[in-house]
Image (cartoon, rainbow, N blue to C red):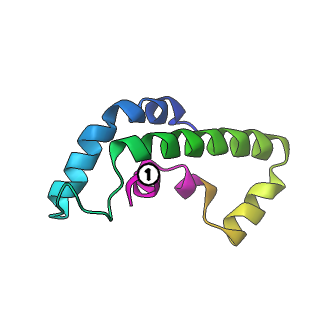
């Protein structure tokens, strides 16, 4: 998880990211399809905690990452910034 430091600072960018999503997809500020910054914050912290735990688990048992990749999604994609933003807001 090489971009972890970048992702840990993502919480400070949540308001700007939400504004960008609203403008890019021509959504209103009250659109119920986009979570608020207040809702996205705890989701982000939970995702980062899960990623940290999975990264540790996969460093101890590397074969489990292949199982994760086949049963869910690529772990690398799961840790990607765009994916995290989607999970937080959409």
The magenta-colored residue range is 76-90
The residue sitting at the bottom extreme is 71
Q: From this view, report whether residue 63 is shown above or below residue 44.
A: below
Q: Which residue lies at the image location 46% right of the left edge and 51% below the top edge? A: 84
Q: Quadrant of residue 48?
A: top right
* Mark 1 neighbour density, 10 Å: few (under 14) some (14–19) many (20 or more): many
Q: Which residue lies at the image location 65% right of the left edge and 45% below the top edge? A: 50
Q: What secondary structure is the stretch in magenta mostly built from?
A: helix
Query: Where does residue 35 sit, x and y in percent of width and height?
Result: 36, 54
Q: Secondary structure at mark 1?
A: helix
Q: Is residue 58 left or right of residue 36?
A: right
> How many labels sit on residues?
1
Q: Which residue lies at the image location 17% right of the left edge and 60% below the top edge? A: 28
Q: Does the stretch in magenta take in 86?
A: yes
Query: Where does residue 41 sit, x and y in percent of width and height?
Result: 44, 40
Query: Where does residue 82 sit, x and y in percent of width and height?
Result: 40, 53
Pointer 1: what residue? Answer: 88
Where does the N terminus fall, quadrant-wise?
top right
Q: Nearer the viewer, residue 85 or 37?
A: 37
Q: Does the stretch in magenta take in 35?
A: no
Q: Nearer the viewer, residue 60 or 36?
A: 36
Q: Which residue lies at the image location 50% right of the left edge and 29% below the top edge? A: 5
Where does the C terminus fall, quadrant-wise?
bottom left
Query: Where does residue 37 sit, x and y in percent of width and height?
Result: 34, 43
Q: From this view, report whether residue 40 is shown above or below residue 31.
A: above
Q: Is residue 46 left or right of residue 13?
A: right
Q: Is residue 90 left or right of residue 51?
A: left
Q: Is residue 20 left or right of residue 59?
A: left
Q: Quadrant of residue 30?
A: bottom left
């Amino acid at each position: 998880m090489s971009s972890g430091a970048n992702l840990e600072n993502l919480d400070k960018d949540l308001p700007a990211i939400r504004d960008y999503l609203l403008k890019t997809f021509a959504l209103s500020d009250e659109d119920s399809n986009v979570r608020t910054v207040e809702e996205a914050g705890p989701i982000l912290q939970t995702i980062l905690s899960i990623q940290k735990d999975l990264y540790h688990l996969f460093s101890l048992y590397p074969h489990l990452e292949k199982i994760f990749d086949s049963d869910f999604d690529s772990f690398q994609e799961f840790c990607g910034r765009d994916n995290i933003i989607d999970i937080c807001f959409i």
